[in-house]
Each structure stands twice: as C-alpha cells, then as structure tokens.
Image: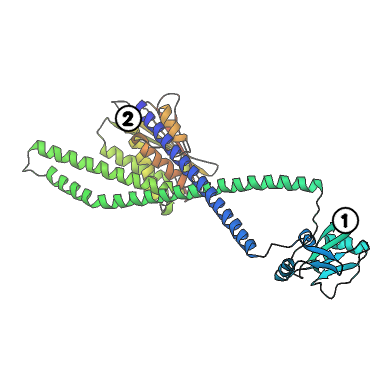
Amino acid sequence: MKRDKTERINYNYRRAARLFGYWVLAVLGVAVLTLILNMVFLFAAAAVYAETDNHYIYGGSVMEALTFTENGYVLDSDMEEELEEKNQWAMLLDENGKVIWSVRKPEELEDTYSRSDIARMSKWYLKGYPVRMRVWDDRIMIVGMQKETMWKYTVEFTIPWMDFVKRTILAFFFINFAWIVVFAFVFTKRFTRNRERARMEWIAGISHDIRTPLSVVMGYADTLEHSEELPEDARQQASVIRHQSVVMKELIADLNLTSQLEHSMQALRKEKVRPAEIIRSVAVSFLNDSVPGELEIDTRIEPAAEQLYINADRQLFMRVFRNLINNSMKHSGKNGLVEITIAMWEEKGKCHIRLEDNGVGYSAEVLRRLCSRKKDLAGENIRGLEIVKKIIVAHGGKIRFGNAEEGGGYCMIMLPGGKRLFSQKNSQN
C-alpha cells in the first residue's frame, strides 16, 4: 500500500512537472512570437520611414550658406541646388516682417508679414505650406516645404493626462503579459487534450487488436479444458489460462469504458428501466454462481419503490451493481460468509439506493481517491469502483462511499427522475 501511494505521488509529481513544463514552453513561445511580430512591425515601419525623404534643410543651414554683398544677399550654389533637389524654398524676413531675400518662394505668399502671422506660422502652417523658422539676430529665416508633404502640429498635453498615459502604458504591459499567459494556458490545454485524444485512440486500437487473438486463446483454452484426452493437470492449466484470459478481457473492457466515460464519449442507450428489477436480477445471478455459505444478499426494496423507473443504460446500470458486489466479495477481508444488503427507496422524487457489506470497510486512501474530483492514477483495487462512479455521474446522479459505524463499507447512490410505471393503488391491487 505504501509503495502504491509512493508511485501515485511520483506519477502525479511527474504529470504536474510535465504540464508545468508545457506551460512554461508555451509562455516562452508566445512571448517570443509576440516579440517577433512587434519587431517585424517596427522594422517595417522603420523601412517605410527610411524610404521617405526625411533629410530636411533647416534655417540655420540656409543662413550659413547666405552671404550679404553690395548687391544684396547671395546664396551658395550648392545650397540652392540642394533646395531645388528637395523641393524646398526659403525666405528671409527683417525686423519688420518684410521679405528681404527669397529663393523658390511660392507666388501666392505675401512679401510682408505681421507679428501675428509670424506667430501663427511658427506653430502651424503658412497657407498650407509646412515651414520651419530660425531667428538670427533681428532677422528670421523661414524654410518651407511643398503642401501635403509634412504633418505639422504643436502637441500639448496636461500633466494629469500624461500621468494617465503612463498608467495606461503600465496597464497595457500587464494586459499583454496576461494575454500571453492565458494564450499559453489555452495552448497547453489544447495540447493536453490532443494527447488525451491520442491516448484514447491508442487504447481503442489496442483493445480492438487484442480482442481477436484473445478470443482465440480463450477458445482453445476452453477446448483443452474440456478435453478428456488430456490429463487432469493439463486441463487444470488450460482452465487457469481461460480464467486469466477472461480477466484480461475484462481489464481491457474496463480500461476502454473508463476512458470513454471520462471524456463523455460513451453513448448512453437510455431506456425506461426499473432499478428494483435490475438489483434483483444481478443479485440472483451472483447467488446462483456462488458456493453455498460464501455469499448472502439481502434486498430491501420499499413497496413504494418497486414500480419506480429511471431513464438509464440498462447494461451500464447492471455493471454498477456487478462491480459493487464483486468489490464486496473480493475485498471483504473475511474468509467466511459475505453479507451484502441492498436497500432502495424513494425520497423527494429521487431514487435512493444503498449497498452495505460486512467487510472491513474502505481504507482512508481508497476513500480519498474515490471522493476526489481530481484525475488520479486509479489502482487495480478500485478500478471497478471508479467505473461505478463514472457511470452514475454520466447518468446525472450522485454517489458517495463510506464506512458504516457498525463495520463494513457502504455505497450511497441517488438518481434523478424517479417515476412510477403504475400508481401505488393499482400496484397493490
């Protein structure tokens, strides 16, 4: 028992470590992908910006290339060629706002500007032309570009709004981080779901492939077991082979059924069934197959519950009671008579069933694993009970395992939708 518990702990630890590893890899992968996408966007924006002609000529450069002579201002030929190449123009204003020199100035512009005109063009545009200004002593050098070539606005923000922007940027960072974590979680969940689906397909394939050779082994073993030409020892060995083949077949069926119920892939063939009839049928079959003095089953079904029926899968519902009775017989912990009591009654429109035995009861570890909602590595000793639990849950019912005060274990089942086939009055008649 201690070894099994250690193995389960190690298994859960490895499984948790594996899932955590997948999650970390997913986080790193999504983070790297996000970084790459952002870098691609930034490089694309930088490439588009680099293709534009952003080498503008400023007023200081023009002023340095401008020389005052007896005939007025003369501009260096190289600067004039550069202005023409970049499709820019320039003009020089005196202290009164009058144009005293210009080159390539658009004709629609005036030759004199007031202080208000100069103030406006310093922040905005000059009749739609983007301009830059440079004050030089008592003169003002204005260098302009053509219309529709530059977005130029003075941007001002209040300090509270800038504080809000800072908080928003921080929140945006955490939102991106949360998005990465959530996306990684979804990716990990999908990955594990695909793994579970692959595991189910593998189980189904193995079950299908083993079924045929196992049937052959069982057939030959049964023939050898009943052959009068073989000695008694050989027939006994054939009987063991046949019995172990049946056990193997049941284990494979249990594994397949557990996997299907766990992922809600078992198609429930629901029909109107009477739990009282099924309980008695399963109890009679066990009593007929048991050795006298080995098993005693006491069914206590209230008269009001005799005609109750529920919508359930008959075969799976019979499987529930076969597994419960089998568990009581195998794990009773006694060499004498195994006593099982099955009680059934109706309460608040629901069907209640309680199965008790006179065994040693369930251990604390088994109860913990049966009551836990987490997926656990079910040991062989509770595989049948795990199937019982999954079948009842698949039918919308509730199930509880425990130990009785007077000794022995019990299983309490509550099923919804209990109805009577006939009225109690007619059933009594």
The residue shown at (75%, 63%) is: 151
Q: How is the image coloured?
A: rainbow
Q: Quadrant of residue 323?
A: top left
Q: Which mark is residue 338?
A: 2
Pointer 2 or 1: first along the chain = 1
Name the one closer to the observer, 168 or 162: 162
Q: Residue furthest front?
A: 70
Q: Which mark is residue 254?
A: none
Q: How many marks?
A: 2
Is residue 184 in view from this perspective? yes
Is 232 on the left or on the right of 65, as rendered?
left
Instruction: Say what amino acid the circle numbered 1 marks.
Output: Asp
Name the residue carrying label 1: 137
Quarter of the image where the N terminus is located: top left
Mark 2 vs mark 1, CA separation in Å = 114 Å
Residue 261: horizontal and vertical position, in percent? Answer: 41, 47
Q: Is residue 201 above or below residue 292?
A: below
Helix, strand or loop at mark 2: strand
Instruction: Say what amino acid the circle numbered 2 marks.
Output: Val
Name the one closer to the observer, 424 or 151: 151
Is 142 on the left or on the right of 426, as rendered?
right
The residue shown at (56%, 51%) is: 35
The residue shown at (79%, 55%) is: 155
Q: Is residue 414 above or below residue 422?
A: above
**Within 10 Å of the Cα at label 1, are there few (<14), some (14-19), or many (20+) other Cα atoms?**
few
Residue 376: horizontal and vertical position, in percent? Answer: 42, 37
